[in-house]
Amino acid sequence: MKHMTKEKPCKEDIKCDEGFAQGDGYPSCEGEQCANVADEEQSSTDTMAETPTIDPVEEVKLWLDKYLRLQAEFDNYRKRTLKEKMDLVQYGGSDVLKAMLPICDDVQRAVVAMDKSDDIQALREGVRLIAQKFTEALRQQKVTEIESLGKDFNADVHEAVAKFAAGDEKKGKVVDVIQTGYMLGDKVLRFAKVVVGE
């Protein structure tokens, strides 16, 4: 057997390739310090060794506990939203009713004033003011009157209760309003009952 010797001995102050030949398998770090692969493998092994193994029975218990807690939270959420919905149905109109209470007070005062006073003109003025206040309260709640008289009949907002011979000029138009209609925003709250010309 031939004894292999290195052709060029390495000096301690010069970095050399220690027998690596240029080409395949030659480490290249392109001017940066090469990482020690052995150290990386060792740290990876250490990390894996540190991860504790969980007993399957304990893991099942943990997942069961999480499931039960989630189910309890969802049940609480369902009960809370159901209560909120019931409160909304029961007390949803409280703002509107609060807006109507001052008008109710005015009407009661007007009734008392009618029994004590003979001044018809003052009573009429008081009722007119109450009506204006009532209309303003409705407007603040986004309730508006449907303007119908003299307009073209519109089945989307009008309900024809009668027809009246009014001539060609008023044919298809509203000639009388039996009951005023109201809108709540863009939705019909109550259709206007009208008489249509023919």
Image (cartoon, rainbow, N blue to C red):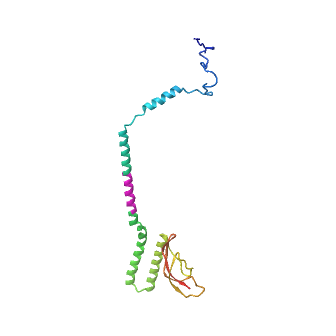
Q: Nearer the viewer, residue 99 or 143?
A: 143
Residue 14 found in image quarter: top right
Tell whether 29 sits left or right of 60.
right
Residue 20 found in image quarter: top right
Q: Nearer the viewer, residue 182 or 102?
A: 182
Number of callouts: 0
Give the farthest residue toward the right.
22
Magenta-span inclusion, residue 174: no
Rendered location of residue 1, percent (x, y): 57, 11
Q: Nearer the viewer, residue 170 or 37?
A: 37
Residue shown at 51% from the left, 26% from the top: 39
Rendered location of residue 75, percent (x, y): 37, 54
Residue shown at 38% from the left, 60% from the top: 82
Rendered location of residue 169, percent (x, y): 60, 85
Up/down of 58 relative to 32, above or below: below
Q: Give the overall secondary structure of the magenta segment.
A: helix
Residue 32 found in image quarter: top right
Give the farthest residue toward the front.
1
Q: Which quarter of the image is occupied by the C terminus?
A: bottom right
Q: Which residues are magenta?
A: 72-85
Up/down of 76 relative to 99, above or below: above
Q: Nearer the viewer, residue 107 or 167?
A: 167
Magenta-span inclusion, residue 74: yes
Residue shown at 39% from the left, 78% from the top: 109
Rendered location of residue 92, percent (x, y): 41, 66
